[in-house]
Amino acid sequence: MIVVMKPGATAAQIGNVIARAEQMGCQTHPIYGDNRTVVALVGDLTNVSREVFGALDGVLHTVRIQEPYKLSSRATRPEDTVIEVAGGAVQIGGPEIIVMAGPCSVESREGIVEIAHAVKEAGAKVLRGGAFKPRTSPYDFQGHGLKGLEYLAEAREATGLPVITEVMTVETLPMVAEYTDILQIGARNMQNYGLLQAVGKINKPVMLKRGMSGTIKEWLMCAEYIVSSGNKNVMLCERGIRTYETATRNTFDLNAVPFVKQTSHLPVIADPSHGTGLRELVPAMAKASIAAGADALILEVHPDPDNAISDGRQSLTLEMFAQLMHDLRRVATAVDRFVGEAPVEIAVDELMPA
Amino acid sequence: MIVVMKPGATAAQIGNVIARAEQMGCQTHPIYGDNRTVVALVGDLTNVSREVFGALDGVLHTVRIQEPYKLSSRATRPEDTVIEVAGGAVQIGGPEIIVMAGPCSVESREGIVEIAHAVKEAGAKVLRGGAFKPRTSPYDFQGHGLKGLEYLAEAREATGLPVITEVMTVETLPMVAEYTDILQIGARNMQNYGLLQAVGKINKPVMLKRGMSGTIKEWLMCAEYIVSSGNKNVMLCERGIRTYETATRNTFDLNAVPFVKQTSHLPVIADPSHGTGLRELVPAMAKASIAAGADALILEVHPDPDNAISDGRQSLTLEMFAQLMHDLRRVATAVDRFVGEAPVEIAVDELMPA
Amino acid sequence: MIVVMKPGATAAQIGNVIARAEQMGCQTHPIYGDNRTVVALVGDLTNVSREVFGALDGVLHTVRIQEPYKLSSRATRPEDTVIEVAGGAVQIGGPEIIVMAGPCSVESREGIVEIAHAVKEAGAKVLRGGAFKPRTSPYDFQGHGLKGLEYLAEAREATGLPVITEVMTVETLPMVAEYTDILQIGARNMQNYGLLQAVGKINKPVMLKRGMSGTIKEWLMCAEYIVSSGNKNVMLCERGIRTYETATRNTFDLNAVPFVKQTSHLPVIADPSHGTGLRELVPAMAKASIAAGADALILEVHPDPDNAISDGRQSLTLEMFAQLMHDLRRVATAVDRFVGEAPVEIAVDELMPA
Amino acid sequence: MIVVMKPGATAAQIGNVIARAEQMGCQTHPIYGDNRTVVALVGDLTNVSREVFGALDGVLHTVRIQEPYKLSSRATRPEDTVIEVAGGAVQIGGPEIIVMAGPCSVESREGIVEIAHAVKEAGAKVLRGGAFKPRTSPYDFQGHGLKGLEYLAEAREATGLPVITEVMTVETLPMVAEYTDILQIGARNMQNYGLLQAVGKINKPVMLKRGMSGTIKEWLMCAEYIVSSGNKNVMLCERGIRTYETATRNTFDLNAVPFVKQTSHLPVIADPSHGTGLRELVPAMAKASIAAGADALILEVHPDPDNAISDGRQSLTLEMFAQLMHDLRRVATAVDRFVGEAPVEIAVDELMPA
């Protein structure tokens, strides 16, 4: 249930709603928007009557939420959530489309610093790179671990780019959280509820990837696990789902982008690298992601993809990435968003038929 | 096998290649491009040696085709195929992105004429409408049949818009072909090989929808059935595939758009109406389709979707369609294409942050 | 709607129900069971009131059918349908489990006669073999056509086994129907409604394969297309569906067997050859099919699978088939059915541990 | 690489092989079978030559393993692994088919003890029950936790049945391991590699459920994570996969049973309750599971399914379960296995028709 407070409701009135709800055994989550405050009541609501709350001072009205995701729902919070990364240096969910780029795995100190400089120059705002890698085989390279985190930190220092990296276990969470600006939950861990609750207790933005066979509803419920544990800074990342089609690595479900944007107030990120698995399809699908409404992109970039330790087949070269950033600016403009600082120049006359 | 002729090879030299191949029991398909002619050899090539052909006069070189789709393959024909509809009034596969629009079913004479005028005014170039409807239940409305075709013809006369409609059986093919400008093969019939071969013998553009569980490779092989029967005017329409996700009617596999564009020279059409099944997602996914590289869109539009006989949930209102056409022009410009006649105006300065 | 007549209702009373329904614009399908007669009303029932029919002489009660499949539904006909093949020589849907066996394609006259003798000796009751083959590529072997049908007929004459073969088009239906005892509709044609309606007008048993991505509900609706066209002798064949799993050719959805048996009165056939695609898995899954409740099996058998023109990977050798028939007898007994000449008698006491 | 020792190879010879491999930087896993010992070498084998090992004393030959699963592979260990539960009181993977039964969730002390008595009387050998429940929604019942474990222990004490229960996190693993006889890894955690490695360091049988979209190969690789961490007592549980079909809760991929039995030496367990999601389909699919070759079944049973806290729709009543156990005995006999105290003897003659 959502208790919507009147504009101008006082802190005391809000406190009273919370107190009554907690007496009844509910958990409460007050959400302070620009224009109004709402209090979400979750837990066992069997014995909670809307009339009681509708009658309290300062309450405008109450809403029964049908969707099982409450805190993540746009019904609870109509305004887009804008997530501040690295103290606000980067904002995800606003008019600017943020591009995160970097290698699949952090391979070496020099390598990651070099890539960081290159992607920054092309317009990326966040550096990606894996230190702990979930691998199908226990015998494959599992990432450089702590060393990888240290290299990422050096690249951040060298370039000023905030970093995003994956956390795979509750045990390594404190270590990863110390080094990264955004915590990534990978597709295989979408329903690792212990991990979701643990990142829910950390005050750091989280990017939650959709599981390979996760329905959109399940994915939003996983976001709910994090948000209801206390961390509201959750971003949802579409990275392709598993279907019968094998021509591409995954089936990139771009429908999920506008669907989630309408259903939830949380930012949506698209990952065309995993969504396609094929470097040559990434530019087209990166543009499509922006046209579909994504708030950010995460892209794999490598100076020498054929010799990358992992995911080389889907990594862009630095040249391809720079060209793509140029093209993305134009598409962003066409949907009233922007990528990077520089103004876009389009000579529309030249585009028209003679 | 592909025999690539030298630029300037004579008709006699080409004829000689064809004659030799036919002596060996192959079928031959000469393809005359702007810059060069190639002769595709299909059938049992077990006893055909490349050396024999490489040595003939006028032959530049020979290529062994690995993909099972030969005539549809970009290796056979590097240039995009541009399909002329209604005597060239509309061209699909060139720089202009063609929008086809109209109701799911032709419901009445007045209705279809009214919609035709409205979608034309908004910029559509082709009118869609179903006269024969494949329905899951034998007890559901199956379309107006011949009457529906007649209504479509009236709407064409009234507006000048060419029409596209579905043909479901070999028996009704002559009738449908008499009335329509483009023959649509529906998703359920993607592998109805008898029907594919029959439309392959007709001299009319064909739009082949991907089957609900058709792989991209199978879909291209179905195009191959049509092209190898003699009709080169085939367009491939992505309309969503069946997956475990039920939040949307289908999973719109936009990856297929750039994948097919790279693999084949045939035009690719996107159908965001069936691809999403939800009216409110259609605009975002129509924009994404263009950004991904589609050559045309096919959209369901109805003046009163809630009272449509079929597919109302995914039909745009006339107002939504007009607004969408405006937005599509901007996205098309951003990918160096265009929609409709009118130039696009973008005031880029206003889009940038202060 | 189903109008259930009283036991002993007269032909005149039944005729009266039919006449009234047809006055109201419904189609009627009387179904004469051993114990009672029901009249199924299909079509537009908007203006049909149950009260009118409930009040007619000889009517016991009326039932509103919720499922969209009416004539195929067990609510309409609680008793199992038993289908007589070849004038009753073989019965499918009764206590005997029928095994149909033979090669994927009819390859030669001698070959098919040899296989027919071998499978008959091992206990098969129907000979399978493809004369018209649906192939993904237009360049692959498409079957021997009429010649294949003639060879099948010779094998039938030599062994007395009825035959089953696939019909792919309406045009070839009269020819195929002349030669075969059971018409097979292949997976690709499950929703080829023109073909379904055409076999619905023929008086021959039909085996309808489930489409690669057909839901159980859609499949039953396709059976409904045939039955509502007039042919009640429909059998449903589970042959595996398309999923993300590629270790096996298809995912054999054995859940469909008990599900359809509960929902419909039509016989269910299992095809472990296509369901697995791997010869070495066929025996286990054939046994599982019987344990799950299938009324018949259809199995690919070839004397030299590695040199079969098609589907060799999933074909049993003659030796494997003979061994499997032995094993199937034991499993059939365990579920109170039998394979072969007559039921096996097992004293229950002997089955229990000492 | 697998180094196969000669029959009668000495401990010193085996030790020498291990020492050489470790000098080269490989991990070694000696596997002591009844007839022969093999040493599996895993890790980076780039610089390891088969010749070196082939030449050592006591070595019969060496095998290069192609499958990425080494320790789980039947190539490494041709004999079936038989897992001893509760000190050998129950053996899984031998001729006896073990039935595990109980409620989805442990709901109360009295409830679980009552069910334990009932399922034991009907022939179950292991009691199942959830204390920690993975739930899609953070607001749903999450299980009784430690209290649930204590109730399970009481039911074990009252009946002598060993218990199986799910462990969801590394943190709760020591607690769960203290109470349970078999550790269950749920479908959502199939690729929770941290958890897999943690149970790999515990000396307790583990039942690893297949993930909703796990391929058979990925699933075997997850088993490999556990086995390569040191715990060889792994059982694989097929519980249905996620596909487009919604008539049943999951698509029960019984193909996986014979496929895994051929590929791996580990026991395979089938879960028809989750595999179907519908109580009325469970008996047919339990029988089919045994016919397909499963070594054990896990079944949800509840005295009052309609009032179960979770999974009531797929739980058998106690009466249905008792009847099913009777039927399973007959099917087990038909595939040369047994359910319950001792093998049933059937004279083959009596199985044949008179």
Image: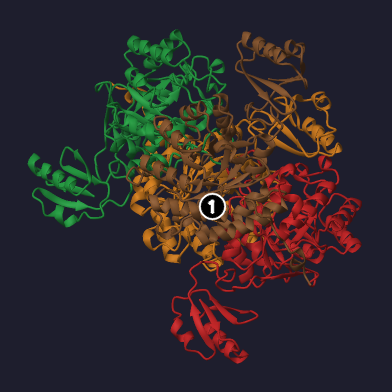
Chain colours: A red, B brown, C green, D orange
Q: Residue D96: horizontal and vertical position, in percent?
A: 47, 38
How many numbered marks have been drawn onto this rendered protein structure? 1
Q: Residues within 10 Å of mark 1 (few under 14, many from 20)?
A: many
Q: Residue at x 32, y 18 (%)?
A: C178
- Quadrant holding the C terminus of chain D: top left
Q: Which of D125 and A245 is in front in this view?
A: A245
Q: In which quarter of the image is residue D259?
A: top right
| Residue B187 visible at all | yes
Q: Which residue is drawn at 34% across and 37% down?
A: C223
Instruction: Tell me the chain of label 1.
Output: B
Q: Quadrant of residue C126?
A: top left
In the picture shown, does residue D21 fall above or below B283? above
Q: Is mark 1 on a helix, strand or loop?
A: helix
In the picture shown, does residue A24 fall above or below A252? below
- Quadrant holding the N terminus of chain D: top right
| Residue D127 visible at all | no
Q: Quadrant of residue D310?
A: bottom left
In the picture shown, does residue D59 fall above or below B177? above
Residue type at the position of mark 1: Lys
Q: Nearer the viewer, residue D297 or B105?
A: B105
- The residue singled out by tag 1 in the image is B120
Q: Residue at x 51, y 25 (%)?
A: B201
Q: Which of D115 and A243 is in front in this view?
A: A243
Q: Is residue D294 left or right of residue A98?
A: left
Q: Residue A349: horizontal and vertical position, in percent?
A: 75, 53
Q: Residue B158: horizontal and vertical position, in percent?
A: 46, 48
